Amino acid sequence: EAYDLGQRFTKMVRERQHESLLPWLEDVARSKIDALTGFANGIKQDLAAVTNALSLPWSNGQTEGQVNRLKLIKRQMYGRANFDLLRRRVLARQIRC
């Protein structure tokens, strides 16, 4: 049952089937599988955002990638340089793109 619910969720996300979300949440609640129930409760807490993520064509993946890149650069430079070098490394990367 857990496998079936997991596969349904994966298909729902990949195919962006927002109309399948509420029936899936109801099926998870009936299943009494603790791990999935906890996951579903987390989804219910921010249901509007999850529904929008499944139904809207936009993504914040590019933004998250840039934030991750900046954090990596900062971690690599920790204790080694000042803000000026950080600024040059970040801006130099953007110029080359």
Image: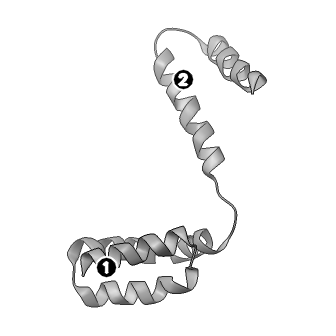
Q: Which amino acid, mark 2?
A: Ile
Place residue 69 in its image quadrant.
Answer: top right
Q: Which amino acid, mark 1?
A: Asp
Q: Which mark is residue 73?
A: 2
Q: Is residue 61 left or right of residue 97?
A: left
In terms of sequence position, does the residue under pointer 2 or pointer 1 come before the other? 1
Asked if residue 41 shows in the view, the reply is: no
Do callouts 2 and 1 mark residues in contact (Cβ within 8 Å)?
A: no
Identified at 40% across, 84% down, the residue is: 25
Q: Residues within 10 Å of mark 1 (few under 14, many from 20)?
A: few
Residue 82 locus on image (x, y percent): 59, 11
Q: Is residue 87 above or below residue 10?
A: above
Identified at 58% across, 30% down, the residue is: 70
Place residue 7 in its image quadrant.
Answer: bottom left
Q: Quadrant of the N terminus?
A: bottom left
Asked if residue 7 shows in the view, the reply is: yes
